[in-house]
Amino acid sequence: MRRIKGWKAAAAGLVALSLVAAACGGDDEESSGGSAAPAGECETTTPVKLQLQWFTQAQFAGYYAAIDQGFYAAQCLDVAIVEGGVDIVPQQQLADGAVDFALSWVPKALASREAGANIVNIAQIFQRSGTLQVSFKDKGIASPADFAGKKIGNWGFGNEFEIFAALTKAGLDPAADVELVQQQFDMAALLAGDIDAAEAMTYNEYAQVLEAVNPDTGALYTPEDFNVVSYEAEGVGMLQDAIWASGERLADEAYRATAVKFVAASIQGWAFCRDNVQACADIVVSKGSKLGASHQLWQMNEVNKLIWPSKGGAGMIDAAAWDRTAKLSQETKNLEGSTVLTKTPDAEAYTNDIVTEAMALLQSLGVNVIGSSYKPITVELKEGGA
Amino acid sequence: MTATVTTPQRTSALQRRLRRVVLFVVSLLLVAVVWEVYKAIGPADGGKIFGWKLLPRSNDNAMPHVWEMLSRYADPELRGSSRAIWRVVLAGAWFSFRLALVGFFIGTVLGLLLAILMARFKVAERGILPYLVVSQTVPLIALAPLVVSWGGKLEIFGWEWPRWLSASVLGGFLAFFPVAVGGLRGLTSPPAASVELMNSYAASWTQTLFKLRFPSAVPFIVPALKLAASSAVIGVVVAEISTGLKGGIGRLIIEYAREATSDPAKVFTAVFGAALLGLTMSGFVTLADIYMMRNRPKEATT
């Protein structure tokens, strides 16, 4: 009998402990509801879930600012921001109906659309590509033509097509003329000399190398130590962060109206970040980002450069840039000989209707959506981005 | 008289435990010493053996000094932040521990139910067991986004599926397997003579299960639970990395890994946190083991 009591008691203990553990599980979504909402003006608030590509960082500052400044609440939206992860594919979460809107780079989202996901680009937030290829000066890599015979780092997972497009444009064969190396998400391989040139985003990885100490001088690396190839400047930039909506649900008037309000308040958030760089970086830090303060400010500033000035107004999808992205996605072959897209994306893959309505809404609020007088600030990076 | 007999036994048990603790600490120190010795004599930029690049780099970026890693714990996580890294890591480990515990619970219940089902019906064993094996070959990172996505849509009577539960479910997914297999083995372990004795008492199957099969399954289930405990931790940590769940040790590992370019020592603080988590979890099961086995003759455990 005593034996039986033993395992019974142990089982009961396990149950009790698990229940305790379950009861105190944390809440992981950032929500705009509550204090920020001007109570009384909204009859009902619409809950909205936005899926990010990655963790909280200044790359998404506009959305956090819109929550913090009550721009969503003013539109009667209760926006919850869902962070991404290593294996979370935002456009997939959107297509599955787990979220209402998702951020994604255009080529990847178009590939999902071609595979059957009915998703529509409703606002092209980043007007320019922020992808770079960074190398030490002594490697002599000043343009894609210099990639020949070099070890070229890339992230894979569909983030590498600008590299292939640049190689193809420079008349190089990606399979034979360069050695392509899968790269980690830090820049250690570049600093250690494992690769000659590393793929980097202006707003993140490039800052990481500038935050590292040069063992030869004991001081931080400086931009003078590196050659930087910008894919945007090389004419092979592909459109990046855009807001995607469910094509199916856009037929529904209520969802469409929500989309207009969401896009408007988001752009308002980005405009706020353009004019209040430091405040926005602070908002992101307060939302639990683990990146250091100077790194965050750098990122905020670089992201602003990708958005502002925005010729046709922030969020407007520029047909020329769209067509270039679609064309490169069809023509650029990767190592396996496949392209991102097999055919031209259909006309329904993007719409400027929603962002146009959002602009009208913002104009009535007096928000400057062009930012023609935008000037970036100068950010001094500290060691480790601290 | 009895006192004089038991006292030396008790001290020897105490000594044994003490020795294990000391050995554990010594082995930790040994790892640290090996690390530092390799760092001192190993090639700074890696080395080749017969043309194969086998020797890892020993420079400060690839292998930070042990004291470098340990001293990180005292540093604030971010400039201007009052929270030291050790507190952040502990908080993360505690968060993941609770998730792993839920996962462990899910896995144990599911595993035991499956084991009972398979022990009861031979057909079930033949039908289910192959699928159990197949289930463990599905890569967790492929499953994680799916579970998050399914969970995101679930709503039962207004109770919304919290995101952390997806991580626990994935922990449970890894944890149930050893319990199911070990449980089945244990439940079918009583010798035919014992089962026949129960039959001769006209004991029902349930009575046999609780009075004979479960008690004799304990020596099989306990090691299975130990495996399940560490599997639950792995499942939760991988799920956190995979789905970016905030608050846990898995998320800390990638967040600190991003800073590896300029601060390679920082990520190790989180890695050690994950190791601590695994140790705590299996220590927890060991305690349960000692408790359940306290009245058992020693032979039964071997």
Image (spheres, coloured by chain):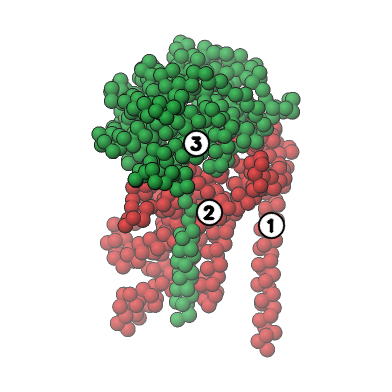
Chain colours: A green, B red
Residue at 37% over, 68% down? B188
Q: Name which residue type carries label 1.
A: Val
User: What is the crowding at mark 1: few (fewer than 14 residues within 10 Å), some, or many (at least 20)?
Assistant: few
Crowding around mark 2 (Cα neighbors within 10 Å: few <14, some 14 to 19, many 20+) is many
Question: Foreground residue, A182 or A384?
Answer: A384
Instruction: Give coordinates of residue B194: x percent, y percent.
Output: 38, 77
Q: Chain of mark 3?
A: A
**Of A121 and A19, the residue lying toward us:** A121
For mark 3, what is the residue?
A65
The kind of residue tagged 3 is: Ala
Numbered mark located on residue B95 in the image: 2
Q: Residue at x 64, y 38 (%)?
A: B264
Looking at the image, which is closer to me, A232 or B24? A232
Type of amino acid at the residue the image marks with label 2: Phe
Local SS, label 2: helix
Cα separation, mark 1 vs mark 2, equals 26 Å
Quickly name the residue at label 1: B25
**C-alpha gap between disc 2 and disc 3:** 28 Å
* x and y, in percent, of residue B137 in the image: 40, 47
Q: Disc 3 on helix, strand or loop? A: helix
In the picture shown, does residue B268 fall above or below B214? above
Q: Residues within 10 Å of mark 3 (few under 14, many from 20)?
A: many
